[in-house]
Image (spheres, rainbow, N blue to C red):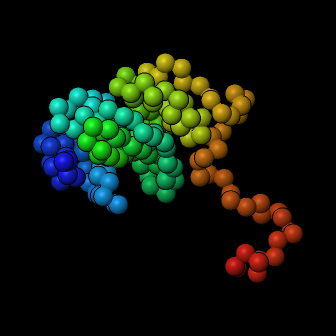
Amino acid sequence: MLTNEAVAQDIIGRFGESVSDFDDPFDLLTLTVSREQLIPLLQYLRDHKTFQIGFLTDLTGVHYPDSPGREFCVVYHLHSLINNYRIRLKVFVAEDDIHIPTATVIYESANWMERETFDFFGIIFDGHPKLERILNMDEMDYFPMRKQYPLEDGTREDKIDALFGR
C-alpha cells in the first residue's frame, strides 16, 4: 500500500527543489511542481513501477489575483487505479507569462480539460493539438472565471442590505 510519506520522499529524491509545498489535506498528497518539471513528473508518476498513476481524474485552473507572480494555478488530480491512490499537483504561473506545457503528451484525456481551462481562465497550454474555446462563444474576448469582475451590480437599487446579512 502506498503512503503519502513514501510517495513524497520518492518525488523529492527524484525532483529535488522543483517540487515544494507538500501537504496532505483529507489524506490527499498535494504538492507544487515547477512548470519546467511538470511533464517529467507526470511521466515519472505514470511510468513508475510501483506508483502506476495512470489516470488523470481532473485538471482545472484557479485565479489568485492577489498573489503577485503566482496569479494562476493549474491543478491536476491523478489516480492510480491499481493502488487506489490519489495525488494532487499544482503549477503556478504569473499573469504576464500564462503558458504551461500540455499534458496531452502523457494523458490524452487532458485534451478537453485543457480546452475548458483555457476557455474559462485563459491559461495557454503550449503544444496542445487544438487549443480553442469549447463552451463559450468564439467572439468572447474575456475569460469568465477570472476574479477580475465585480460580484454584484453596484447600480442595483432593488436590494435590501438587511436581507443579505449586511
- Expressed as whole percent of the image width and height from the top left, the position of residue 142 reads 66, 39
Quarter residue 84 falls in: top left
**Residue at 87% from the left image edge and 69% from the top image edge:** 158
Q: Residue at x 62, y 29 (%)?
A: 133
- Left or right, residue 134 beside residue 108: right
The residue most toward the top is 129
Q: Along the line of sight, which residue is nearer the eye, 138 or 44?
A: 44
Residue found 25% across the figure and 34% down from its top: 52
Depth check: give the residue in front, 127 or 104.
104
Q: Is residue 97 depicted above or below 4 in this figure?
A: above
Q: Assign the C terminus to one quadrant of the image.
A: bottom right
Q: Is residue 160 above or below residue 144?
A: below
The mark total stands at: 0
For residue 153, which quarter of the picture? bottom right
Image position, residue 76 (x, y; %) = 40, 41
Answer whether residue 151 is visible to the viewer in this image.
yes
Residue at image position (62%, 51%) is: 148
Point out the residue furthest to the left here.
13
Q: Is residue 28 left or right of residue 140?
A: left
Nearest to the observer: residue 65 or residue 111: 111
Residue 132 lies, in percent from the top left, at 59, 25
Is residue 126 shown to the viewer in this render? Answer: no
Q: Name the spot of residue 65 as percent of width and height, x first.
A: 52, 53
